Image: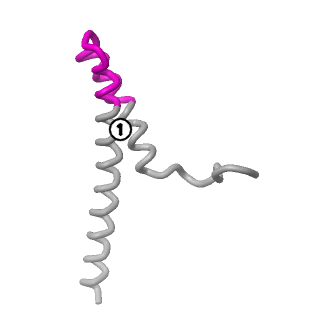
């Protein structure tokens, strides 16, 4: 079998970036559809925001868990 293991879930950052891009493109089409390249720009912004939020969420959860484990000692 070649390629990534299909049994493993996709990384959260990649999934968040894809969802963010879709939401950004949809918002760009609805709100700014007449402006040249606005949907594309909103898709790029949405992808970056989605990946950033997912990454930040992971960092905050790891920090919270580490604090909880230190307090339990």
Question: Quadrant of the image for the C terminus?
Answer: bottom left
Residue 7 appears at what percent x and percent y?
63, 52
Number of numbered discs visible in the structure rendering = 1
**On screen, residue 14 above or below 58:** above
Residue at left offset 39%, top offset 43%: 16
Residues rendered magenta in the picture:
22-43
Q: Principal SS element in the magenta part?
A: helix
**On screen, residue 27 above or below 14:** above
On whether residue 34 falls in the magenta region, the answer is yes
**On screen, residue 17 above or below 60:** above
Residue at left offset 34%, top offset 29%: 43
Q: How is the image coloured?
A: one colour
Along the viewing direction, whichever of 30 and 38 lies nearer the viewer: 38
Residue 62 appears at what percent x and percent y?
33, 68
Outermost residue on the bottom side: it is 73
Residue at left offset 29%, top offset 49%: 53
In this image, 32 relative to 8: left or right? left
Residue at left offset 31%, top offset 63%: 59
Other residues around mark 1 within 10 Å, as few (<14) / some (14–19) / many (≥20) = many
**On screen, residue 69 above or below 13:** below
Outermost residue on the top side: it is 34
Helix, strand or loop at mark 1: helix
On whether residue 41 falls in the magenta region, the answer is yes
Residue 26 appears at what percent x and percent y?
34, 22
Disc 1 target residue: 47
């Amino acid at each position: 079998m070649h390629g990534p293991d299909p049994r493993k879930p996709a990384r959260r950052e990649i999934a968040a970036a894809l969802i963010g891009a879709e939401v950004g493109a949809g918002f760009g089409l609805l709100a700014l559809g007449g402006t040249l390249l606005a949907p594309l720009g909103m898709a790029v912004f949405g992808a970056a925001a989605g990946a950033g939020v997912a990454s930040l969420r992971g960092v905050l959860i790891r920090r919270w868990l580490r604090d909880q484990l230190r307090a339990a000692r």
